[in-house]
Amino acid sequence: MDMLKRVPIREQEPIERIHNFDEVCFGYTSDEAVMEAQRCLQCKNAPCVKGCPVGVKIPEFIQLIKEKKFKESYFKILETNLLPAICGRVCPQETQCEQNCVRGIKGEPIAIGKLERFVADWFRQNCKFEFSKPQPNGRKVAIIGSGPAGLSCASSLAKMGYEVTVFEAFHKLGGVLYYGIPEFRLPKEVVEWEIENLKKMGVEFKTNMIFGKTFELEDLKQEGFDAVFISSGAGLPNFLNIEGEFLNGIYSANEFLTRINLMKAYKFPEYDTPIKLGKKVGVIGGGNVAMDAARVARRLGSEVYILYRRTETEMPARKEEIVHAKEEGIKIVELVSPVRFIGDDSGHVRAIELVKMMLSKEDSSGRRSVKPIDGSNFVFEADNFIVAIGQSPNPLIKKAVPDLELNPNGSIKVDETLMTNIEGVFAGGDIVTGAATVILAMGMGKKAAESIDRYLNAKKA
């Protein structure tokens, strides 16, 4: 065995997977996971842990895999992260824990994410989740939103003995984990299993509950909730604000993925919510959401082009997702920026006018900025376009709580403890940071739980 190279992971062949929504990655077998675990150097200072937003005890859980103690490994992860089956699939480990892996200095870093996924999947398939409930402390906390921040906060508070109720606007739980990430990257049964475990921990969930519409902050106070955590995410899609943007045949990635994931639009005629795409589709953007939208469109039978204003090197999407997209026949058109959409006589989009861009110096974020090349405009024809240029914080929250202080970008303003300007009301996740990663949102949920616990203990004293 070459200790410098990862144990390869098996995947669906591209020619097969573009015709289904089954998970692309098959995951490690027990033998493969043990072999990969043997590559870990068990570093004393564990730089990998420092790269994890929730501080998973990485060397310890990998050592347990090496010893074939898979159940014990699962519970070791659970000490800091209650959603390993999800995180093992969608977290950008390559820029976090794996980026800090010492093995990666002279070879390939340990496949930490794939090992985390293996442990969670093994436990899900072989064991029953059990939880010893702590003594109730008599306090109630309301959580608004069942995305990664809300679920993380709920699990942490449940471990402390709090009575926790999660309010979700949709009819399905999981937030962006459910409606935003396609089945082939994160199976819904995995999300549902993780949430069932939370229910076993005593967390109550209420669906179809829209904050500011079906219930108010005052209602929560009257029901005896001692604190509130707002984690309603970044559900407002950003728009290009260019001519023709409201022509038929143009989707925001948010709407497109929600209809696919939540309303099963790809299962027609089994479900009455079809999305009909033409032969050729253009996806505008270069992040993970753009990749998800492009790969879904490919599975719906379209020829797909990603239109991005920088080059592939600057794309914020995970490299794994870019590789998978290209394997599936998706083409990337670099250094182009939208100018206007062009429609036909019936009001349906038929093309987009693009301008060629050129890279210049790095901007304040460390990425190279771009500027248009005069006179380089050209027309790109397609039957549909999907706009995936990011999301903004949920705007309904301000209407629900007019006194709530916001930042200029619409996110909720919080202090270092994640408390808002309203006493006892905390916030975290994408509603505070803007669209970010699952694991960062979870880290904020965990921090909020600790802050809520300190706040209520101090108040009681």
Image (spheres, rainbow, N blue to C red):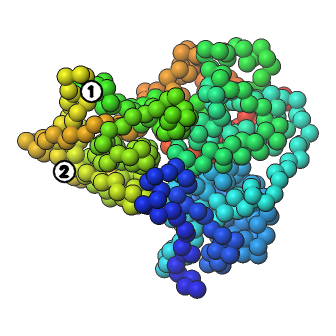
The residue that mark 2 highlights is: 358
Decide which of tag 1 and tag 2 comes sooner along the chain.
1
Q: Please indicate whether residue 98 sits to the left or right of residue 123 in the image.
A: left
Question: 10 Å neighbourhood of mark 1: few (<14), some, or many (≥20)?
Answer: some
In x, y percent, where is residue 223?
A: 79, 17
The C terminus lies in which quarter of the figure?
top right
The N terminus lies in which quarter of the figure?
bottom right
Quarter residue 75 falls in:
bottom right
Does residue 434 appear in the picture of this structure?
A: no
In x, y percent, where is residue 109?
A: 53, 71
Q: Please indicate whether residue 362 sits to the left or right of residue 295 in the image.
A: left
Q: Residue furthest left?
A: 375
In x, y percent, where is residue 365?
A: 36, 48
Instruction: Decide: is 209 above or below 174.
Output: above
At label 2, the amino acid type is Met
Q: Residue at 72%, 75% (x, y): give it.
A: 66
Residue 165 or residue 33, whichever sits in front: 33
Question: What SS does tag 2 mark?
Answer: strand
Q: Residue furthest front?
A: 269
Q: Please indicate whether residue 378 sits to the left or right of residue 235 in the image.
A: left
The residue that mark 1 highlights is: 348
Question: 10 Å neighbourhood of mark 2: few (<14), some, or many (≥20)?
Answer: some
Instruction: Decide: is 201 above or below 100.
Output: above
In x, y percent, where is residue 54?
A: 64, 52
